[in-house]
Image: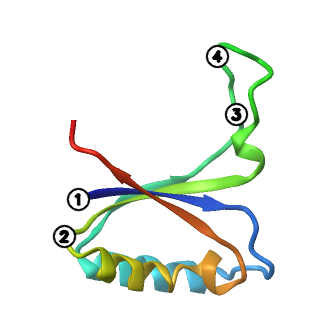
Amino acid sequence: MQYLILIQKNNEREISTRAWEAFFELASQSGMFRGGSAISDRQCIGKETSHDSGAYLGGFMRFDADDYAALQELLEKHPVVTHGGSIEIFEMPKT
């Protein structure tokens, strides 16, 4: 199953570069990590009054996992989570 992880900008403590590097290494070693990116400035197409997701989202990550419990265990070590913030996990349906 594929999963999309949305990274909130709500961590309570600053995250060091080393913490991010360690998590990316752990994620890569898991075999589940499929990439991701930070999110930069927003450009809106369509209804201009829509909520600015970039105000509270800092990035995304993609994972493939047959074992959801293993993915959840990995994501509990995510730097935003360990620094007092949160991430959102979305299962990507096969269509």
What's the CA distance linking mark 4 and mark 2? 36 Å
| Three-letter amino acid code of the residue under disc 1 | Met
Task: Quarter of the image for the C terminus: give it.
Answer: top left
- Local SS, label 4: loop
What's the CA distance linking mark 3 and mark 1? 29 Å
Which x, y percent locates residue 50? Answer: 74, 26
What's the CA distance linking mark 3 and mark 4? 10 Å
According to the picture, the residue beneath numbered tag 3 turns out to be: 42
N-terminal of the pair, mark 3 or mark 1, is 1
Q: Is residue 79 visible?
A: yes
N-terminal of the pair, mark 3 or mark 2, is 3
N-terminal of the pair, mark 4 or mark 1, is 1
| Three-letter amino acid code of the residue under disc 2 | Asp
Whether tag 4 and tag 1 are in contact, CB under 8 A, the answer is no
Q: Residue at x 64, y 16 (%)?
A: 45
Q: Is residue 69 left or right of residue 61?
A: left
According to the picture, the residue beneath numbered tag 1 turns out to be: 1
**Rendered position, 81 above or below 54:** below
User: Which corner quadrant of the image does residue 47 belong to?
Assistant: top right
N-terminal of the pair, mark 4 or mark 2, is 4
According to the picture, the residue beneath numbered tag 2 turns out to be: 66
